[in-house]
Amino acid sequence: MQFQYENSYKVKDRIADKKVAILPIGAVEAHGPHLPLGTDNLLAERLSEKLAERVNGYILPTLPYGQVWSLKNFPGSINISNDSLISFIVDIGKSLYEQGFKVFAMVNGHLGNAVAMKEAARKLYEIYPELKVLYLFYPGMNKVVPEIRETKSSHGTYFHACEIETSFMLYLAPEFVDMNKAINDIPNIPMSADVTPTPWEEFTKSAVLGDATLATEEKGEKVIQVALENMVKLIDQMKEGNENA
């Protein structure tokens, strides 16, 4: 259920019933010639919708900007700092707690947000330890992705506009994918990129990190269903912990 469409006169009792607030967090950045700038927002939103149905949670309005330092020089990318993102999340978390929510689940569509989300969760824990805060980024995907991937990953952590992320989009938001423009662009990412700041234009011109032409809806569904099941389990555990406290 979408939180922003509720009425102030009725929402207090419904918060008490649902207890779970789900915040989609994405980014606006280059995603190659076949995917939109808001890919990470779309993925976070669509996944949050599926999650909310399973855990009886409220979906908050999407936080649409993220830390995209690596791609900030590509056309269309909009970057905010980790500090800005941390402050935004902490302020939202404080309001949620004061409104009566027990579980604050952030559904992340952009890997670059992970550091800020974790730090924000720690800050909220120090202020409101009884508020259960989760930062979720496709939990369990690393176990299932090797089963469906047809090409070797260009990096141990990154996946971007490639076979995997394009498959996510084909499953969750297919109307925004133009497979006629999908490309195979597997960059050689230097080891130094893991240990020193490295703008991505140093190793890719397309912002595609793999073979997007191999993406399918079936691959996306398989990974997303595993991630969704894990998200549901994690949130249910947090809800049970609050009820038993």
Image: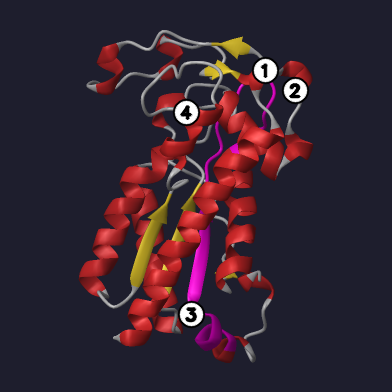
Q: Is residue 79 visible?
A: no
The residue indicated by pointer 3 is 19
Q: Amino acid at mark 1?
A: Thr
Question: Between tags 2 and 4, which lies in front?
Answer: 4
Q: Amino acid at mark 4?
A: Pro
The magenta stretch spans residue 221:
no
Q: Of the residues under marks 2 and 1, which one precedes in the sequence?
A: 2
User: Whole-Å distance between the Cαs marked 2 and 1?
Assistant: 7 Å
Residue stretch in magenta = 14-39
Q: Residue 108: x and y, percent?
A: 48, 49
Q: Residue 141: x and y, percent?
A: 46, 40
The residue indicated by pointer 4 is 146
Q: What residue is rendered at 76% in x and 26% in y?
A: 178
Q: Of the residues under marks 2 and 3, which one precedes in the sequence?
A: 3
- Crowd tier of the residue under label 3, counting other residues whose Cα lies within 10 Å: few below 14, some 14–19, many 20 or above: many
Q: Is residue 146 left or right of residue 117?
A: right
Front one among 35 and 245: 245
User: Whole-Å distance between the Cαs marked 4 and 3?
Assistant: 36 Å
- Crowd tier of the residue under label 2, counting other residues whose Cα lies within 10 Å: few below 14, some 14–19, many 20 or above: some
- Crowd tier of the residue under label 1, counting other residues whose Cα lies within 10 Å: few below 14, some 14–19, many 20 or above: some
Q: Quadrant of the C terminus?
A: bottom left
Q: Amino acid at mark 2?
A: Met
Q: Quadrant of the N terminus?
A: bottom right
Q: Which mark is residue 179?
A: 2
Q: What residue is rendered at 20% in x and 69% in y?
A: 126
Q: Of the residues under marks 2 and 4, which one precedes in the sequence?
A: 4
Q: Are marks 2 and 1 in contact (CB under 8 Å)?
A: yes
The residue indicated by pointer 1 is 213
User: Whole-Å distance between the Cαs marked 2 and 4?
Assistant: 22 Å
Q: Is residue 72 left or right of residue 150?
A: left
